[in-house]
Image (spheres, helix red, strand yellow):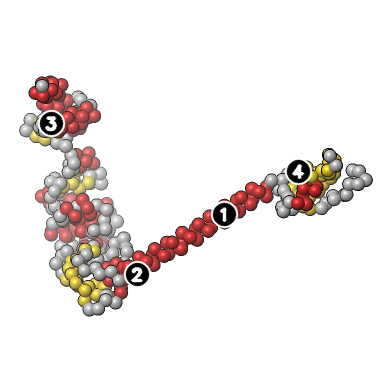
Amino acid sequence: MGRNVKDITGMQFGYLTAVKFSHRKNGKTYWEFKCRCGNTVVRRVDKLKRCETPSCGCYSKEYCEYQKETAQKRRNIKNKIKIAQKEKKHRETLAWRDLTGETIGNLTVLEMLGEQCGKRTMYKCLCDCGNEVNKSQGQLTTKSPCNSTWSCGCTKERHSNSEYANQNNLTTSRIYRIYKNMINRCYNSRNTGYKDYGARGITVCEEWLQGDGFEAFYKWAITHGYNDILTIDRINVNGNYEPSNCRWTDAEIQANNKRNSINIKYQDTLITIKECSEISKIKRSIIEYRINVLKKHNKDLTYENIVNFKNYTYRIKRDKK
């Protein structure tokens, strides 16, 4: 270190601490510094005095991360404010909306009773079971996964535990879950399967529904082949849940007995695509293609037309000519 070089050993410049003199170049002094993060760098002393926060480069990374965190916090606050404003607007809309004529759950709103007074406004409603009941706007507009106030009380009786199930410790059994799910699909409009069952007019017979209907259902199930592998299936997919239209089947048979199942005429019976593939030894994908062609030309879906498809398509082309 020369005579004209000032000793700055130990002095701190931002994140850097001077360790020792390094060299001089073009009349400028260079020192070796140790950064707060542990790195060692060589810097010009006169430039360090002009920097706001000298470092080895770690400060710029920290500052970028800080800026990102700050921006994210601002976005989160804005999103919370927007959500709060939407919820407030939604509550105000529900509080002053006339519900007359709307269908909410199992209730159809007939008329408003008295003067309009927000969520305390009373309405006269008609339940699907035929009973009339008065409900407030707050009860009708409250969001809930399964709102018991959206009926006259009949759904609460249906969804309550069976006395027979309680006495015989069956409330947690598989057969009891099947029974409850069957009722929910038909009568609970909040159920995901309601659109395919209750909305289509499918109901549960009075024997399995009224009183302690689970007892009758349980006795029918035990005497008709129930086990832990089988599931309940309606023979007529458009029919109701009743002893004459229900059976216990495996998943394969139930999958073939659906509204969108394609039936093929074979001799005097109807068979599925899988059964047709097993009988004819033709791949399922090929059979499905042939069925689409036959449907396009409005031809019968018979076993003979599918098996003799090549000759059949030749006749179609010849008729066009």
Residue 25: image quadrant is top right
Which label number is shown at residue 92? 2
Q: Secondary structure at mark 2?
A: helix
Looking at the image, is mark 2 or mark 4 nearer the viewer?
A: 2
Residue 173: image quadrant is bottom left
Task: State which tag comes first along the sequence, 4 or 3.
Answer: 4
Furthest toward the right, the residue is 3
Check if mark 3's residue and mark 1's residue have beta carbons within 8 Å.
Answer: no
Q: Residue at x 13, y 52 (%)?
A: 240
- Which quarter of the rendered picture does the C terminus lie within? top left
Q: Nearer the viewer, residue 302 or 210?
A: 302
- Tell me: 42 left or right of 288: right
Q: Residue 129: percent from the left, percent from the top?
A: 15, 65
Name the kind of residue labelled 2 in the image: Glu
Q: Residue at x 22, y 39 (%)?
A: 252
Name the kind of residue labelled 4 in the image: Thr
Residue 210 drawn above or below residue 311: below
Residue that badge 1 annotates:
69
Mark 1–mark 2 Cα distance, whole angstroms, equals 35 Å
Residue that badge 3 annotates:
297
Name the kind of residue labelled 3 in the image: His
Residue 107 drawn above or below residue 41: below
- Tell me: 183 left or right of 71: left
Mark 4–mark 1 Cα distance, whole angstroms, equals 28 Å
Query: Few, some or many C-alpha atoms within 10 Å of disc 4 (few <14, some 14-19, many ≥20)?
Result: some
Task: State which tag comes first along the sequence, 3 or 2.
Answer: 2
Mark 3–mark 2 Cα distance, whole angstroms, equals 57 Å
Task: State which tag comes first along the sequence, 2 or 4.
Answer: 4
Residue that badge 4 annotates:
40
Q: Nearer the viewer, residue 3 or 107?
A: 3
Which label number is shown at residue 210? none
